[in-house]
Amino acid sequence: MKIAISDVSVGERARKTVGDLAQLQASIEAIGLLHPIVIDEDRRLIAGQRRLEVCKALGWGTIAVHVVQLTDILRGECDENVVREDFKLSEKDAIAEALEERERLAAKERAGRPGQLRSEKFSEQKEKGESRAKVAKAVGISFPSLKKIHEVCQAAEAEPEKYQSLVDEMDKTGRVNGVHKKLKTAQQAEKLRAEPAKPPDGKYRVLVIDPPWSYGRSDDPTHRSANPYPAMSLESIHSLPIGEWAHEDSVLWLWTTNAFMDDSFTCLDAWGFQQKTILTWVKPRIGTGDWLRGQTEHCRLAIKGKPTLELTNQSTALVAPMGKHSEKPDEFYQMVEGLCPGSKLDIFARKSRDGWAAYGDEVE
């Protein structure tokens, strides 16, 4: 059923502005009015104000209408805009893929017409870019966002057991940026894990160092807090070739105690790393101490370049049991392995570990 547009009465509306009508107008011009506007028996508008305004702008004299018996016009306007289900982002990707193929075929057909220049690589790339831009506009998403959505969906299609959860998260939140970042981090981590334990250039992506700090105490092994290993001066620790062992994009975990917190900062500067945070190991019992009895050790997390870390919700507190003197807990190494993909070097290691290269006189 159609009526004259001039006969439609638009009263007080909850929506005060119709917004940008350009995309809707382009759609109606291309494929017509898909949904009639909704009016009551007195020809008062219930739903479809944006469609009505576009048809007026196009100079239409009549418009298709659906007549309902409804006294509460506000409820009708509300339900039409609220009680609806938008396409999920993965569904928009599927629509965009189908539309893009159509656009490409249409572009090829246009290029094959007499008088049209074609076959040059630049022309083909230009058409491809224009097709994608049109498709992004058609599904109501910016082209960069549509590209990210497509990459997430493609990854899930290829390896659903790894990446389907990212599609589910994207569809649930309606956002792609954070999910896309997770995808890229996971893919980079997978690539790094596939690298050999020791790359050909001898550079490591993950380094752990537990320097033998010198407390300046007696070397008498009967002293309660004496080190069971040779200590090094701060200058000697600074001169360690950490830069030669570290990849340009690497993570460093530097162990220190309360007494050497300041000195550990100078070590990071000497080795060219930037501090990010501090992990504190909380031990089950207290130890020695000149002021307060020690029950914690600290590990500085520092980076160089742009390393890959699979961060989720790790805490700055690590509660774990104690081993031999100065030996760090297995829980620490498990956390590092989960966070930091890539080749690994344990400097001043107390024992060998699978998947780790080790530097230290206690390692066989």
Image (tube, helix red, strand yellow):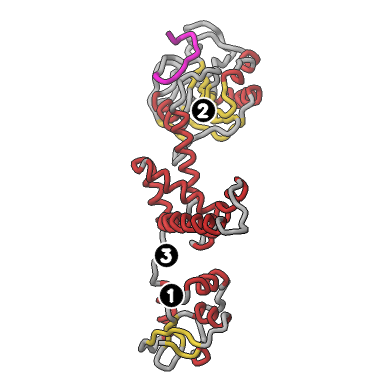
**Span colored in magenta:** 354-364
At mark 2, the secondary structure is strand
Q: In the displayed orientation, state which residue is furthest to the left.
A: 161
Query: Callout 3, which amino acid?
Result: Asp
Q: Nearer the viewer, residue 119 or 277?
A: 119
Q: Is residue 315 visible?
A: no
| Residue 359 on image: x %, y % | 50, 13
Q: Quadrant of the C terminus?
A: top left
Residue carrying label 3: 86
At mark 1, the secondary structure is loop
Observer-side mark, 3 or 2, equals: 3
Find the distance from the CA under tag 3 to the CA under tag 2. 50 Å
Q: Residues within 10 Å of mark 2 (few under 14, many from 20)?
A: many
User: Residue sitting at 42 percent across and 46 percent down?
Assistant: 154
Query: Callout 1, which amino acid?
Result: Leu
Query: Callout 2, which amino acid?
Result: His
**Mark 1 or 2 closer to N-term?**
1
**Mark 3 or 2 closer to N-term?**
3
Find the distance from the CA under tag 1 to the CA under tag 3. 17 Å
Q: In the displayed orientation, state which residue is furthest to the front.
A: 114
Q: Is residue 274 above or below residue 105?
A: above
The reply to whether the magenta stretch includes residue 62 is: no
Prevailing SS of the magenta stretch: loop
Q: Residues within 10 Å of mark 3 (few under 14, many from 20)?
A: few
**Mark 1 or 3 closer to N-term?**
1
Find the distance from the CA under tag 1 to the CA under tag 2. 65 Å
Residue carrying label 1: 34
| Residue 362 on image: x %, y % | 45, 9
Mark seen at residue 298:
2
Q: Nearer the viewer, residue 3 or 224?
A: 3
Q: Is residue 325 above or below residue 156?
A: above
